[in-house]
Structures are given as structure tokens and as C-alpha cells.
Image: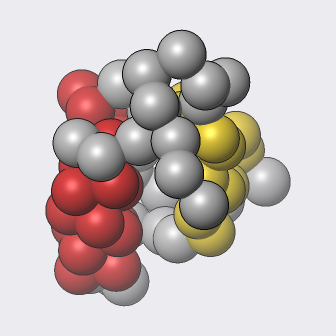
Amino acid sequence: MTLDAADKPLTLCVRADAGPSVGYGHVSRTLAVAEALRARVPLNVCYLMSSGSDASAVERMGGTVVRL
């Protein structure tokens, strides 16, 4: 598939939690993947996170957070 800047953005949904009890690794790694993809294609990122999860990194990146 070939995309250019005029194409409608894709949406990537990621299910991950972050915080002191579960760590931040999954969110950190998936944010890196999302940033690499954003550099190549129009992309919206949506994180599905539990209500107690730390969403600050996702919000700083401009991603959307949906609380479960």
C-alpha cells in the first residue's frame, strides 16, 4: 500500500497500561513505534488504558487516551 500526505490518516489503537506497579515499558516501546510510523504515513494514535494508568507520555505525544 502506498500513502501520501493527501491520504486520510490511519488510526492505530494500542492497548497498554503504565504506572509504578506495571512499569512503563510497553507504553514507551509502542510510542516509539507510533512515532516511527508517523514519520512515514498520516497516523492518529489511540491508547486504550485502564482508569488508573499513567497516560502523561501518550498525552505529551498528542495521542488520544480512552479509559477502560
Q: Quadrant of the N terminus?
A: bottom right
> In the rendered image of this protein, does residue 26 appear above or below residue 3?
below
The quadrant holding residue 27 is: bottom left
Residue 35, percent across and down?
24, 49
- Left or right: 16 in relation to 38: right
Does residue 35 show up?
Answer: yes
Does residue 19 show up?
Answer: no
- How many tags in the picture? 0
- Left or right: 59 in relation to 65: left
Colour mode of the rendering: secondary structure
Residue beneath the point at 54% across and 16% down? 6
Residue beneath the point at 26% across and 32% down? 61
Looking at the image, which is closer to me, 24 or 20?
Answer: 24
- Left or right: 32 in relation to 7: left
> In the rendered image of this protein, does residue 22 appear above or below residue 24?
below
Residue projecting furthest to the right: 68
The quadrant holding residue 13 is: bottom right
Residue 40, percent across and down?
30, 46
